[in-house]
């Protein structure tokens, strides 16, 4: 079985060194603003080459995250960055934007293109569709269950799975909360972390509870790792480009030890999370995956006891000088305690300064010095790539050094020839000592061979220069195998579209009087009803519900449904099937079409393309001159699609019995007193704004078709009566 790769996050140089010391096989990082963690420190296009070279000198791989949606005005810059990264020898780019992918595909030979988790690949058909498009690796969505992973594992494409780190409560690539409330798009790396806030749960107008109901625990599947390895997963991804170097070292080392030795340090892995852990939906953990306020967020290292009116605790693991602990008082206060010396496990540690410590409460480890100490030790020892050195010093000839590392061999000579020493000469031990001075270099000598005449005259500084230049030439020789020649990539121009009549379409998400639907050009439905007969119908394909393609096509034809609306990349797997059967294709807004290159891709087979709700008026109108575009003009944006149900935290129902649950239609209220709707259907919770948005359609050019999305007749009434506009994010766009 091929070795499974451990992929480490890098947000700065210290995190890279920590990942190398921990034993990572590959690294992912971002350059400037093109990564999905725009608030990480990241690297810039000017300095990233040094770090790419360093990773390659260690024989590791480096992937650059360009996994955001790209605006039209950013395409040229994104392409130029990709060209530069190609020259620098990057092993792969992680991409979300399908338009950018179509531009780069087949141009960057030798550099892989990875489908980001933001592309929401969570089943076999989605993975196959992107494989067929030409992606070399699929980063599978975190919500994908193990059963579906088994199917995906059969595909001839590299599979990457998240195994550790922060979890989004929303399905990957389907969260608009941050952009809706603050114009900060999670699809562009600027998530505001709104899911980490407190919310009130409301049912029938009554507040049930207030807590962190969307605050997911951190993912940790290390104890189920063997199951993933048996599937043949190619890469295990650790999340965390905005975390610390201690986090990177500890998590990488734990997974390295688990794979190589079969065991790992559980306490250290526990100490790098302040939310607690879950095995996630991949292993069907349907309870206790939300981190509530009352939950312990840190590892207990003992319990407060009392004896002869003295408080103490017995530690269940070694403690070091400077460990930061937490003590809870009788009144519930949380007080810090810093150890003033080291303690062996099972020591009796008195709490003389904490006389009001609550007996029976846990002493918690807030931060452990052992993490820092272990990392420091590893940082000293990881720079030890073994090289063989041969020094040749012959009178009348130039001094020469030969260096060998793995399959690379170089020779380097100084300019001046060696003379015979008149007085004092350097002996073999002196030369060996100087050749061994590697300081902060990444290499260390495994073997030093010296072939020299007696009584040669050579200065120590010449030996040092010979060693330094030899190392530099060895590095250059190694990096030649990674660096690539420059390439040219042109941004294609597109012909303008013939003027097209504006359509007024309606998307039905509930019960609406069928007679009222006759006022619209096309009706987008979730399921067919007899009352729909005679209408121009399009079936909105549910991206969270599996379907048999042949059965679906038969049903569509039997019901005289005109076409389908794609909402997930998996639907691309069936383009030919639909077209062969005369079924029209439209592109829904869930596919986040953001720029002209993406519009051009879909324009090859789709008769209508919905623009992203995160685009602005200028972008939509500009692209509308070239492509058949539809924009949401009225309705509620799907702020989150979740496997999780907030009300299940109160019910402890393990996400079962949803169809008869009284909380199928509930509300949440955020910290700004804004009410949100929570609808539970088909084992999926969707969060919507309580009130629909209405757009000033006069700001759209005449060729832009309009879409209304409604739950009920009341929504439709509101559309006609309401004279005010909020324009979603169309006025300003998102950052």
Image (cartoon, rainbow, N blue to C red):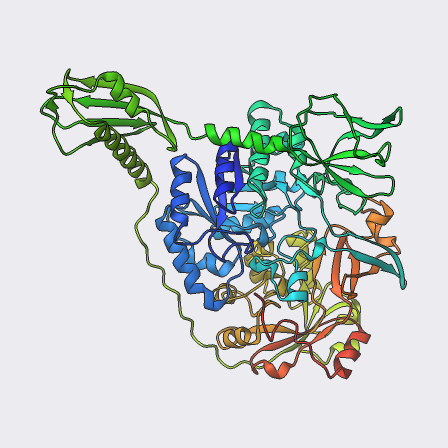
Q: Position of residue 671 (x, y in %)?
A: 77, 61
Q: Position of residue 12 (x, y in %)?
A: 50, 46
Give the camera-side residue of 334 and 27: 334
Q: Position of residue 157 (x, y in %)?
A: 51, 42
- Residue drawn at 20 percent across, 20 percent down: 426
- Residue drawn at 11 percent across, 26 percent down: 397
- Residue drawn at 63 percent across, 60 percent down: 567
Q: Position of residue 670 (x, y in %)?
A: 77, 61
Give the camera-side residue of 252 and 25: 252
Name which quarter of the figure residue 309 lies in.
top right
Numbered label tally = 0
Residue at the top extreme, as displayed = 454
Residue 117 vertical placement versus 14 (above, below): below
Residue 297 vertical placement versus 395 (above, below): below
Q: Considering the image in quadrants, where does the C terminus appear?
A: bottom right
Residue at the front extreme, as displayed = 353
- Residue drawn at 56 percent across, 41 percent down: 237
Q: Is residue 259 visible?
A: yes
Left or right, residue 642 beside residue 83: right
Give the camera-side residue of 163 and 181: 181
């Amino acid at each position: 079985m091929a070795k499974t790769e451990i992929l480490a996050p890098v947000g700065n140089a210290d995190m890279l060194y920590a990942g190398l010391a921990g034993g990572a096989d590959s690294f992912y990082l971002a350059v400037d603003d093109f990564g999905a963690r725009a608030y990480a420190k990241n690297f810039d296009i000017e300095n990233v080459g040094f770090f790419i070279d360093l990773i390659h000198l260690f024989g590791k791989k480096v992937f650059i995250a360009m996994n955001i949606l790209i605006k039209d005005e950013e395409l040229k810059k994104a392409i130029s960055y990709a060209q530069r990264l190609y020259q620098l020898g990057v092993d792969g780019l992680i991409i979300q934007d399908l338009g950018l992918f179509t531009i780069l595909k087949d141009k960057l030979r030798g550099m892989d293109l990875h489908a980001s988790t933001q592309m929401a690949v969570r089943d076999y058909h989605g993975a196959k569709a992107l494989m067929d498009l030409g992606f070399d690796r699929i980063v599978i969505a975190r919500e994908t269950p193990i059963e579906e992973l088994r199917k995906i594992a059969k595909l001839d494409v590299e599979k990457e799975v998240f195994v550790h780190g922060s979890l989004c409560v929303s399905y990957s690539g389907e969260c608009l909360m941050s952009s809706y409330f603050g114009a900060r798009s999670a699809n562009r790396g600027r998530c505001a972390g709104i899911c980490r806030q407190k919310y009130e749960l409301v049912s029938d107008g009554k507040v049930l509870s207030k807590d962190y109901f969307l605050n997911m625990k951190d993912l940790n599947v290390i104890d189920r790792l063997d199951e993933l390895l048996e599937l043949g997963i190619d890469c295990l991804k650790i999340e965390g480009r905005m975390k610390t170097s201690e986090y990177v070292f500890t998590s990488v080392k734990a997974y390295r030890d688990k794979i190589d030795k079969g065991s790992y340090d559980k306490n250290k892995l526990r100490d790098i999370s302040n939310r607690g852990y879950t095995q996630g939906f991949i292993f069907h953990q349907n309870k206790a995956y939300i981190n509530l306020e009352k939950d312990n967020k840190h590892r207990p290292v003992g319990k407060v006891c009392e004896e002869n009116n003295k408080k103490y605790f017995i530690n269940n693991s070694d403690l070091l000088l400077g460990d930061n602990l937490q003590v809870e008082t009788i009144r519930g206060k949380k007080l810090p305690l810093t150890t003033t010396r080291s303690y062996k496990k099972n020591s009796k540690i008195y709490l003389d300064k904490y006389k009001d410590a609550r007996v029976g409460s846990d002493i918690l480890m807030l931060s452990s010095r052992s993490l820092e100490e272990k990392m420091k030790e590893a940082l000293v020892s990881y720079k030890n790539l073994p090289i063989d050195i041969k020094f040749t010093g012959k009178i009348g000839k130039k001094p020469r050094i030969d260096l060998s590392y793995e399959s690379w061999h170089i020779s380097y000579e100084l300019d001046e020839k060696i003379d015979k020493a008149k007085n004092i000469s350097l002996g073999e031990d002196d030369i060996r000592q100087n050749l061994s001075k590697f300081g902060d270099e990444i290499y260390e000598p495994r073997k030093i061979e010296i072939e020299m005449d007696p009584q040669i005259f050579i200065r120590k500084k010449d030996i040092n220069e010979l060693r330094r230049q030899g190392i530099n030439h060895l590095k250059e020789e190694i990096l030649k195998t990674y660096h690539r020649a420059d390439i040219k990539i042109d941004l294609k121009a597109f012909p303008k579209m013939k003027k097209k009549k504006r359509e007024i379409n309606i998307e039905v998400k509930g019960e609406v009087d069928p007679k009222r639907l006759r006022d619209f050009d096309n009706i987008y439905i979730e399921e067919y009803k007899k009352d729909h007969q005679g209408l121009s119908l399009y079936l909105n394909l549910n991206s969270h519900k599996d379907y048999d393609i042949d059965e679906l096509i038969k049903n569509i034809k039997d019901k005289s449904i005109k076409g389908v609306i794609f909402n997930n990349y998996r639907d691309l797997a069936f383009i030919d099937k639909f077209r062969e059967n005369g079924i029209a294709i439209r592109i829904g807004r869930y596919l986040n079409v953001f720029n002209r290159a993406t519009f051009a891709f879909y324009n090859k087979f789709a008769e209508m393309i919905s623009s992203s709700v995160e685009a602005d008026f200028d972008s939509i109108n500009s692209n509308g001159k070239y492509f058949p575009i539809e924009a949401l003009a009225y309705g509620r944006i799907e702020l989150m699609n979740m496997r999780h149900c907030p009300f299940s935290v109160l019910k402890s129902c393990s996400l079962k019995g949803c169809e008869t649950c009284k909380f199928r239609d509930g509300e949440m209220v955020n910290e700004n007193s804004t009410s949100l709707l929570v609808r539970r259907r088909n084992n999926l919770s969707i969060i919507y704004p309580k009130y629909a948005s209405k757009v000033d359609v006069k700001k759209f050019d005449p060729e832009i078709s309009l879409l209304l999305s409604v739950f009920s007749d009341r929504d439709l009434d509101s559309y006609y009566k309401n004279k005010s506009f909020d324009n979603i994010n169309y006025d300003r766009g998102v950052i």
